[in-house]
Amino acid sequence: METTTLPHTDALKEAPTTHPVHPLVRRRWSARAFGEASIGDDELATLLEAAAWAPSAMNEQPWRFRHARRGTPAFDALWDLLKPGNQPWTRNAALLIAISGVKHHARNEAPNASWQHDVGMATANLLLQATGLGIHGHLMGGFDKERTQEHLGLDPEREEVVTILALGRITDPETLEEPFRGRELAPRTRKPLDEIAFPL
Ligand SMILES: Cc1cc2nc3c(=O)[nH]c(=O)nc-3n(C[C@H](O)[C@H](O)[C@H](O)COP(=O)(O)O)c2cc1C
């Protein structure tokens, strides 16, 4: 019988929390060893809908998601915009998504002070939903922003790309070259709570 080696990295990467944090939060991590498995159309729709249900100032919903599947010219074009340090491990991602935000309120054209905040809220929803589906995501700020804006035909005064997200299903970390393999296996760390939270 054929046997497959399941990636053990999920267990390795689970956040070692001291309090009973929800498993979806503990188990989300930024993976790099994407395998061949794809993401279905229904799964993608679920991810996008989870993002859409995030809160936003005045319910403006400033987030926009432009997605491309591996093996398409659209994917190759987005991949080409990534910084060299992000290119080797994103080749196998099932999807790349350019995540952007509209910077003004639709109703009166006034600047929306919280557009970046709200794009982040939607992105977090998407990532947690992905975790629930066994899909891994990895956000990247490392891309050529100017060229990306041009490529997508976006006027930076109106709409700005914040991150490019790689999504997929993980495989054996040994498929990665260094330094990415080492990063895939490194423990996850966070500041202690008393450095980020203060009773008033
Ligand atoms: C806005 C943003 C930009 C990021 N840019 C990159 C990037 O260009 N390349 C990369 O490998 N990781 C990038 N990351 C991933 C972070 O390094 C990662 O989230 C952080 O180290 C915490 O690890 P964890 O997501 O596994 O908990 C980015 C994350 C965010 C939120």
Image (tube, rainbow, N blue to C red):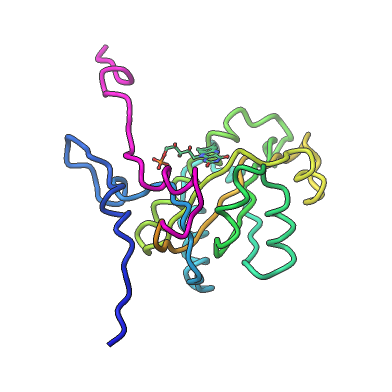
The percent coordinates of residue 135 (x first, y second) are 42, 61
Outermost residue toward the top?
A: 200
Seen in the image, is 21 located left or right of residue 138? left
The percent coordinates of residue 114 (x first, y second) are 57, 31
Q: Quadrant of the N terminus?
A: bottom left
Q: Does the rendering let one see residue 63? A: no
The percent coordinates of residue 115 (x first, y second) are 60, 35
Q: Magenta segment range? A: 174-200
Q: Is residue 180 magenta?
A: yes
Question: Which residue is at a point 47% across and 69% down the rendered structure image?
Answer: 43
Above or below, comparing residue 46 to residue 185 in the picture: below
Seen in the image, is 195 located left or right of residue 49? left
Question: Which residue is at a point 60% across and 52% down the rendered structure image?
Answer: 88
Question: Which residue is at a point 52% across and 66% down the rendered structure image?
Answer: 44
Number of callouts = 0
Above or below, comparing residue 76 to residue 62 in the picture: below
Above or below, comparing residue 11 to residue 155 in the picture: below
